[in-house]
Amino acid sequence: MADKKKMVEAITSMEEDFAKWYTDIVKKADLADYSSVRGCTVVRPYGCAIWENIQHDLDGRFKATGHENVMMPMFIPEGLLQKEKDHVEGFAPEVAWVTHGGEEKLTERLCVRPTSETLFCEHYANIIHSYRDLPKLYNQWCSVVRWEKTTRPFLRTCEFWWQEGHTMHETAEEAMAETERMLNVYADFCEESLAIPVTKGRKTKKEQFAGAEATYTIEAMMHDGKALQSGTSHYFGDGFARAFDITFQGRDNKPQYPHQTSWGMSTRIIGAIIMTHGDNDGLVLPPAIAPVQVIVVPVAQHKEGVLEKAGEITEKLKSFCRAKMDDSDNSAGWKFAEYEMKGVPLRLEIGPRDIEQNQCVLLRRDNREKTVVSLDELEAKVPELLRAVHDGLYQKALANREARTWTARTFDELKALAAEKSGFFKTMWCGDEACELRVKEEAGLTSRCMPFEQERIGDVCPICGRPATTSIIWGRAY
Amino acid sequence: MADKKKMVEAITSMEEDFAKWYTDIVKKADLADYSSVRGCTVVRPYGCAIWENIQHDLDGRFKATGHENVMMPMFIPEGLLQKEKDHVEGFAPEVAWVTHGGEEKLTERLCVRPTSETLFCEHYANIIHSYRDLPKLYNQWCSVVRWEKTTRPFLRTCEFWWQEGHTMHETAEEAMAETERMLNVYADFCEESLAIPVTKGRKTKKEQFAGAEATYTIEAMMHDGKALQSGTSHYFGDGFARAFDITFQGRDNKPQYPHQTSWGMSTRIIGAIIMTHGDNDGLVLPPAIAPVQVIVVPVAQHKEGVLEKAGEITEKLKSFCRAKMDDSDNSAGWKFAEYEMKGVPLRLEIGPRDIEQNQCVLLRRDNREKTVVSLDELEAKVPELLRAVHDGLYQKALANREARTWTARTFDELKALAAEKSGFFKTMWCGDEACELRVKEEAGLTSRCMPFEQERIGDVCPICGRPATTSIIWGRAY
């Protein structure tokens, strides 16, 4: 472990085996570990610190838009889950069932929540009486369970952590505006804090959330060209409200059904960060959510004054960013490799010669650019470089997406592209599920979304030749 | 709901029915609501905001003492739970069992974690290899499930939210020091942030955590004289390490077992806050964890300039405390009652005459003391009054505890006191469980703790007459 080469060799290169490269990073950057619980992982301190930063950032955005947090039970009685027909059909096959409490057999099974619409609805029925009680803008941070057959850390696990917003509104228009607003909150978060460009759009009926009238999504492209659905926002109309008998007295004094939304983002997004920004030296973290933004590595630290100066600089850095010094007795080379693996955005190197000249070296993780900086300028230069890392990551990801986005005007063209390339494939579409299924069967692609930014690629659906109603993006997805 | 009297009448007085008073506050201060899930509650936005403040405060104390957060699976395979004999005996009777995932019956049942020692141990066995890997100082925030027969919001629910620290150390001494250190962190938090005086001590063997070698506790006294165990810290020795085969290479190059602790504090503490500080007008919140520290109530708000000035003051307050203005069209009287019910520490009243005189009225929730304060002095006066509320609450709680603490020198004296009083009863004790059981049977009291601050009340155990080894506190507990 003492030299850089040795550590770097230990990661599979992404060109060789992208899936293996991914799990190597999860393991070697100390993000997560396997457990003996089927499909469940242990999120280790470094992974957990990333998630805490994500939570903190998102939670601030939710509160700034008027949302409040609540904590709901983790169990849903079977009868409650069954109240909304489409919803139970979508989720019942993949839930974990509690049948015994202590030594007694339960009279009604409880499922461990796969999502909490039903619990929120039961509560809303208790607390919503008048239009004055609306809107209700609730969110919860928790873990949920879905009995997945194949799992991968962060991307798909039987238990995962997330937030789920559930809101109730007086009118359909308000609920639709909320659905869109929260999709924008997610998109802004991805672009501003994670440096991940996303495509906003609507899911096809086939890919819609169980019980929703409309599902909006943000789709990100991973380094290998595959798509990752990074956050979704659903409009429910009054379907659940009717099923759960939630009514309120309207402004006209008549009973009405409220209109509902839900929206969620999960620990999957950590998988998106890895696969958007990571490279063959390991993780690369966007500064906004990096647990350590600047790692201070003293060079020739046994020499007089080096550790003291490095410590002093670290304290100074801590007043305006998340900084840490590694003064362990590992070699500088080992430390370089270690914090590259962990994706720390900036490395600050300082040795005896630097001290003499009142300077240090700052190295960007994203492009390895070195800058010599005067110690008097740190307060200005470090934030500037952190912003540069963010912008560099964003531009690189955007360039990858642009290079891997193709347009097809015929079905043959789509099939040929799909056979050769990995990325986003744009076509027109008639809106018929039959065509969507043919694309799946014959081109191996699923619909990612009907983008909000519509393009006019042609007039007809290239699959069936009938008039097109929308442009659509196809891809392969995680 | 429009006048104060009506609202206040709606709460049962604590002298009339303490249990009803408690649940009235939970409901009317919008802290929690019942759900159709057996023994589980919905924690509403106001209750959740209190818990978030508690989390934030405690988490800062954990991080300041070098702890890191992780996230473990919520399930424990039956075989894993059974590895440590005493532990499984303690918990198996009260866990919820998952027997089916989706449509398939599981080959091994999974319990929903009642506590996570076993999961942490499994993980520690994977990641601890050398003395250089120690200590491991981990914590997690999550909810756990224990199948309780009778439940009450916050105090005892089948699912509750908590943090559980789990640490591993090279030596027994280090682990014991950690056990004590974390008990002190809890005690300091209770006294400094919750204004709840606590008694630190050790639990008797009978009351010890399942699988622990020693359990330390902080015991708080509620308004009615009953005790509430508010936080516990356990020393495990190397019992779990042996059961889970966790070894590390010691400084002497030989394999050794690490020494372990765990410690937890839960949403129960919200019950402690209610029952320590609450009064017949509702909740009274210690300022450090109050979601709103100052509620601004404009008086005669329809008069010109009142709302503007009140809004301006609220913005100013927000720069140094958590402030909120209620400019709804409810009457001032209704607002007064509402925020008293919600326990907001300070009320700021401002009307046209105050504005003329560049002043406002600040009213303390704890003792209803009014202070007229110049608008130019808010930045100094508000923090001062918040501190005064904290101190006032602490002193009142301490006085209650002192007034309800009795010393008994004979068993008859103890029984007579227990029959008449509610509070803490101090005696000497021989350390024999037989005597502890007699106190339970004949006086209806359980042991709360053997306090760290030992007293010499006499030389013999008043129950059996044999030599005493310790002083002990008895009581009735939530």
Image (cartoon, coloured by chain):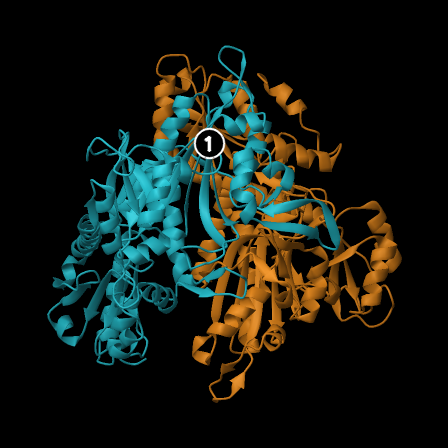
Chain colours: A orange, B cyan
Residue at (56, 34) in percent of width and height: B85
Residue at (85, 54) in percent of width and height: A443
Chain letter of disc 1 in the image: B
Residue that badge 1 annotates: B167
Q: Work out whether residue B454 or residue A299 is closer to the camera in this orientation and state it.
A: B454
| Residue A5 x/y as whole percent | 63, 19
- The reply, left or right, for residue A418 in relation to residue A14 is right
Question: Can residue A268 be seen?
Answer: no
Please tell me whether mark 1 sits on a helix, a strand or a loop.
strand
| Residue B103 x/y as whole percent | 75, 55
| Residue A420 x/y as whole percent | 83, 45
Residue B343 in the image: above or below residue A316 = below
* Kind of residue at badge 1: Thr
- The reply, left or right, for residue A476 in relation to residue A359 is right
Q: Work out whether residue B367 or residue B325 is closer to the camera in this orientation and state it.
A: B367
Residue B245 in the image: above or below residue A181 = above
Q: Quadrant of the N terminus of chain B?
A: bottom left
Residue at (76, 71) in percent of width and height: A469
